[in-house]
Amino acid sequence: MKKVQTKDNIVHLAKVHDTAIVYPGAKLGRNVEVGPYSIIGPNVEIKDNTTIGPHVVIDGWTTIGNNNKIFNGASIGLEPQDLKYHGEKSFLFIGDNNTIREYVTINRGTEGGGGETRIGNNNMLMAYCHIAHDCQLSNYIIMSNAANLAGHVIVEDHAVIAGLTGVHQFVRIGKMAMVGAHTKVVKDVPPYIIVDGHPARVAGINVVGLRRNGLSPEVRQEIKRAYKILYRSELNISQAIDKMDQELVTSPEIEHFLRFLRNATRGIVR
């Protein structure tokens, strides 16, 4: 047990192992645990009930929310792996209820990406995953072992990225999409679909994911119609968007699908 500074500048006893190093200036919330040989840098803030395992390094201007579990060997908030980075102040924000497994690496942002890497809530990042500078991850995402995101990648809610997958910089992975193992992703992955292969190819609708996330049969049917228009017709993307806009029964899910396609700048996986 050691005396540490809380986020409210109140000194209290935290569960910090005797071999851990918590730099002056670091702010720890209530019931934070820091395991053996871990290092917490001076600009780090960790909120309540977060557990840090052994041999973890957390540095830089990093803020971590409540009820997270960070396992041994993780490296969080260190400098981005970008030759354009020259030591400027940049940030990492991690939300609540995330599980960050062994040897995960998460880098801070860069000036060219707005200076921030962000991870939302309730995500599972399995062992050896890498999240590069300026990535933006939403909520309830699963990244399996050794999945890797290059810089500026956006991942939306409830997406699943299987193991040993590589995602190119600036790619966007849509809501409830699933990326198969060993996949090379170089274009945007629309919501609700499965992609697989090297390079990625469309493999169908993520039916299991849609059901697990409580989408009604009516909405699932419209997503199926949207998929057929986009991938089973001879229309280009603009024509497919127009057809879907005219023919599909509107819902938040369909609106999101169309908005994603309209904003796709890298092209989409076909």
Image (cartoon, grey):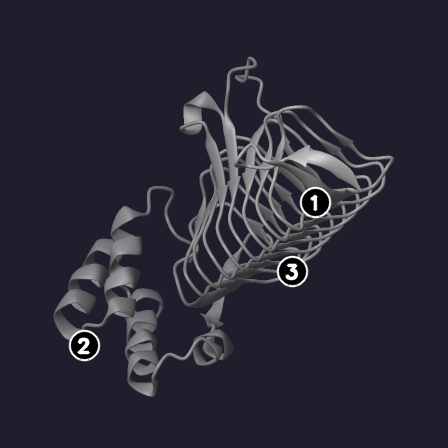
In this view, the residue farthest toward the bottom is 217
Q: Is residue 83 above or below residue 107?
A: above
The residue identified by callout 3 is 181
Q: Which mark is residue 104?
A: 1
Residue at 80%, 42% in the rendered image: 1
Residue at 83%, 41% in the rendered image: 17
Left/right placement of residue 138 relative to residue 217 reads right
In this view, the residue farthest toward the top is 86
Q: Secondary structure at mark 2?
A: loop
Looking at marks 3 and 1 on the same chain, the residue that comes earlier in the sequence is marked by 1
Q: Is residue 127 visible?
A: yes
Specify the quadrant that holds the C terminus: bottom left
Left/right placement of residue 107 relative to residue 33 reads left
Could you say which quadrant of the image residue 98 lies in?
A: bottom right
Residue 249: image x %, image y %?
Answer: 18, 77
Left/right placement of residue 17 relative to residue 141 reads right
Q: Which mark is residue 4?
A: none
